[in-house]
Image (spheres, coloured by chain):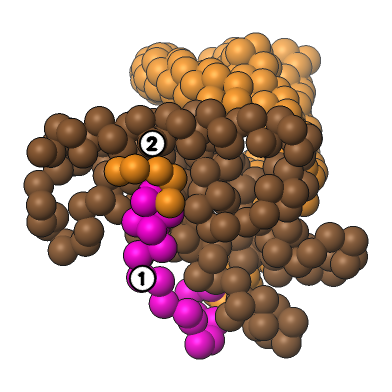
Amino acid sequence: MNNFKDIQSIYDGQKSAEPTEIPRELQKRIQKADSLVNNSHIKNIIILSITLLAIVGIDRFYFTATSTLFEIGIISMIMALAIRITIEMFSYRRKKNLNVLRKSDLFIADLKAFYQWRKKIHQYPTYLTFLLYVIGVGLLFIEFHNHLSQFWFVFFLIEFVVIMLVLIIFIRKKIRKEIKSLNEMIDLYEV
Amino acid sequence: MNETFNRLYKENYAKVYRLCLSYVSGNEALADDLAQEVFVKIWQKLDQFRNESQVSTWIYRITVNTCLMHLRKIKKSQEKITDQIPENLSSETEDGKDDRLQMLRACIQKLNEMGKILISLVLEEVPQKEIAEAVGLSNENVRVQIHRSKGKLFKCMSSKEMQNL
C-alpha cells in the first residue's frame, strides 16, 4: 500500500452489474410508498380512531342510563385516545416533512430534531395518556359493580389489574429500549 | 413507469448501489435494500428536480440522506458484520471476494459517519465541488475532511496489510 491510488484501484476492482430494467420488487415498493395506508403512523391513527368511535358508539347506544362517574370514565378514555391520535398525526407530519433533498448537514439537523421529539413523546405523554385511559376504565368498574354479581365483578377486577400490570411492565420496557435507541441515534448524528 | 425514471434508474443504479455498499461495509442485501429505497425517494421527488444542479448531485444527495435516515438499520447490521469479520483476513474469503476489498470496507466502517459518506463519494470519483454541494459543506471543509479521512483509511489499510504479512 503506497498511496491512495492503491486504495482506489481496490475499489474500482469490484464488479457491479448494470440493470436492464426496473425490478418487480422496486415497482412494488414504489406502489406501497405511494399508498397512504401502508404508513405505520396512519395505521396507528386508523386503529385508535376505530377504538375511539367504538367507545363513543357503545356509550351512546348501549349504556343509555349511566352515572356521572361512568361518563367521566368514558370521557377520560376518549381524551386519552384523542391525545394519542393527535400525537400520531404530528409525528406523521414531522416524519413526512423530513426532506431528503435538503443539504445533508441540514437533513442531519432535521433527523436529530425528529428523534429528540420522539424521545420527548416517550418520556411523559405516553405515560400520561396511558394513565388517563386506565383511570377511565377504572371508573367504569364502579358502574359495573351495580350490574354484575360479586363473583364476576371480582373476576373482571382481578383480570383488569393483572392485564394493566403486565401492560405497564411491557410498555416501560419498550419505552426504555426505544429511548436508549433514540439516544444512540442522536449521538450518531453528531458528525 | 415514467420514462425519465426508467432512464435515471438504468443510468444510476450501479453508482447508487456501490455508494450504499461502501457505506454499509459490504452487506449486499442491505445495500440493495437502501439503493431501492433511494429510487423510491427519487420517484417521489422526481417532480421537484429543477435542473438547478446536476442530476448526479441530486441523486448523491438523496443517496447520502437515505443512508443517514436508515442509520439505525445500518448500525444493527454492522454489529453483526463486525462479529463475523475476523481481524486478520485470510487470503481467500468464504464467498470468493477479494479480501482487500473486504479490508477496505472494514476500514471505511471505522470512519465517522461524515467520513464514510465523503470517502464513499471520493471512491466513486465524484468531483470535490459536487461532493460539497451534495453534503452541504463548504469546499474548504470538504477538502480538509476528505484529507483526514483518506489519511485514516490509508493508515488502517496499511496496518491491516502488515498484520496479514
Q: Quadrant of residue A16?
A: bottom left
Name the secondary structure under disc 2. Answer: helix
- Identify the residue at image location x=52%, y=43%: B119
- Identify the residue at image location x=76%, y=66%: B55
Picture layout, residue B17 above or below residue A65 = below
Picture layout, residue B153 above or below residue B39 = above
Residue B27 drawn at (x, y percent): 34, 53
Q: Which residue is mark 1?
A: A15
Residue B98 counted in the magenta span: no
Number of residue marks: 2
Report the front residue among A11 and B11.
A11
Residue type at mark 2? Phe
Figure colour of chain A: orange
Quarter of the figure with the C terminus of chain B: top left
Quarter of the figure with the N terminus of chain B: bottom right
Residue A7 counted in the magenta span: yes
Picture layout, residue A78 above or below residue B47 = above
Q: Nearer the viewer, mark 1 or mark 2?
A: 2
Q: Which residue is mark 2?
A: B154
* Left or right position of B84 against A95: left
Residue B151 drawn at (x, y percent): 46, 31
Q: Quadrant of residue A115?
A: top right
In the rendered structure, which segment of residues is drawn in magenta?
A6-26
Picture layout, residue A46 above or below residue A143 = below
Q: Quadrant of residue B48?
A: bottom right
Figure colour of chain B: brown
